[in-house]
Image (cartoon, rainbow, N blue to C red):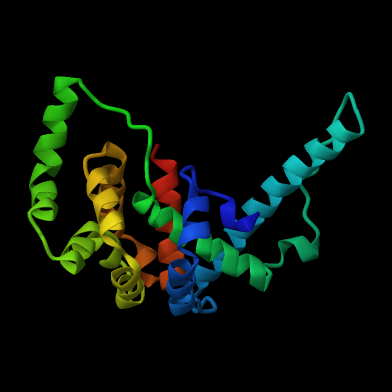
Amino acid sequence: MAGFSTAKSDSFYLRFFQPQLIREITSNMITPPKNNDSVIFWEKYHNLYMTTTQYYKNIYDGIKRNQKKILLQYDLSADEKRLQGNHFLLLQENFVATILQEINPRSNKLYIKNEKVLAVFQEYFLEKIQEIVQTTDKNKQITLFYDDLTALLHYPEHFLSPISHYFTDTHIFNIREQIYTVDYWIWRMFLSQLKKTRITQCDDPVIMGISALLRETIF
């Protein structure tokens, strides 16, 4: 379950149809935490994940036993608090799938028609949208689309190289469709602000994790 713990969008598409892309990015970046901030992130996030899992397990078990009252326990054992290697890998894969969610095909679209909202959107983002749209080179489009994220990474090529290799024209088309969405640009605004924080001292897997969590938290 660790691999599907955060994404509100359909990360199953990437898991089924682009597993090699996710694994290559993850294998490029996977490293043991090298500083205290990175260690704290993984410990806190893993404890949150395990607590949430235990919460729902207790509810499920209580329903199966037809209990009228269900006691919810939040204390984790020492083994449950320990971050296992497979959890570490799955969580990182999930973060990658979350960040790459824009390449997923979308059948349902929501449109904003409020003129004031559209005016603000154009004021802040139109210039950047035009830069992406007017670029015909695939690698340049990919770089522009993820530049606020890669600016935070110590080794951006570990993220960009597999994408350039695996992305097809269909993926680029899906990405271009998403550059007109509000949540994508607000996410990028948050990423640009992170440059001023201690996140830059963290390892790349942690930066990817925080960026993915922001992607899922905004909307």
Q: Is residue 199 left or right of residue 148?
A: right
Task: Give left or right: position of 143 versus 211.
Answer: left
Residue 6 seen by the camera:
yes
Q: Is residue 41 visible?
A: no
- 200, 27: nearer the viewer: 27
- Locate residue 8, reporting x and y percent: 49, 42
Q: Nearer the viewer, residue 62 or 163?
A: 163
Residue found 18% across the figure and 61% down from its top: 141
Image quadrant holding the N terminus, namely bottom right
Q: Residue at horizontal 21%, vertical 65%?
A: 143
* Residue for point 9% across, 54% down: 131
- Of the 4 image quadrants, the one containing the C terminus is top left
Point out residue 166 in the picture as x, y percentages from the top left corner: 35, 69
Residue 199 falls in which quadrant of the image?
bottom left
Q: From the top left corner, tell me how far across and down residue 107 is, in percent.
A: 38, 36
**Along the line of sight, which residue is nearer the eye, 119 or 201?**
119
Q: Position of residue 52 (x, y in %)?
A: 67, 46
Question: Is 66 above or below relative to 39?
Answer: above
Q: How many marks?
A: 0
Left or right, 82 with reference to 92: right
What residue is at 14 percent from the left and 21 percent from the top?
A: 115
